[in-house]
Amino acid sequence: MNRLSRCFAGLACLLVSAAGMAMQIECPARINMQPAVVTDAPDGWQPQQRRTTLPVQDMLVTIGPPADRRDLKPEISSKNGRKSFEWTFVAAENEEGIWLSCGYGNTILLSRKLSRAVTRCRTSESTDGNGYKKLVATCD
């Protein structure tokens, strides 16, 4: 299993830079899921699912676990047609825990709690060699 495959097998890649102790968190480019189970389809309706592989769409940062829905609004900037996002945290927010999440299919989040030492995260977006979106957050 190569390094990239091992990286995608977990939640996200975590790379720590020795220079500034900034960490880079890379969202997996895509995830596979089991077919969805619909429990309350009305009579006559049949659930259909077109795909079970979902590409990464976005990143978000929350105070506390993402299920609490306390999303932090990023500062958004644009350069050469590419948007970048930056979140800055205050100590009181980080006492409750700051979480970074990768979003898939407007439904699924892969999330991880950040270190209490983190005060800021910035994202960059590109594409990988297979045409999938590549999202990386640099947090320090």
Image (tube, grey):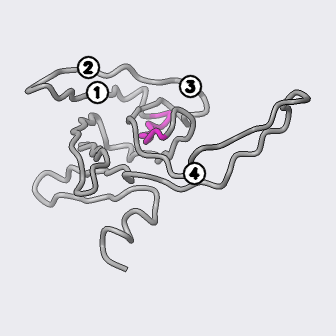
Q: Which residue lies at the image location 39% right of the left edge and 56% below the top edge?
A: 12
Amino acid under disc 4:
Thr
Does the magenta segment cover residue 77? Answer: no
The circle drawn on residue 69 is: 3
Mark pair 3, 1: CA separation:
18 Å
Amino acid under disc 2:
Glu
The circle drawn on residue 88 is: 1
Coordinates of residue 134 in the picture (x, y in percent):
28, 47
Cβ atoms at labels 3 and 4 below 8 Å apart: no
Q: Give the residues drawn in magenta, as a range.
A: 95-104
**Which residue position is annotated with label 4?**
52
Coordinates of residue 85 in the picture (x, y in percent):
26, 28
Amino acid under disc 3:
Arg
**Which residue position is annotated with label 2?**
75
The 10 Å Cα crowd at callout 3, few under 14, some 14 to 19, many 20 or more, is: few
**Towards the viewer: 6 or 32:** 32
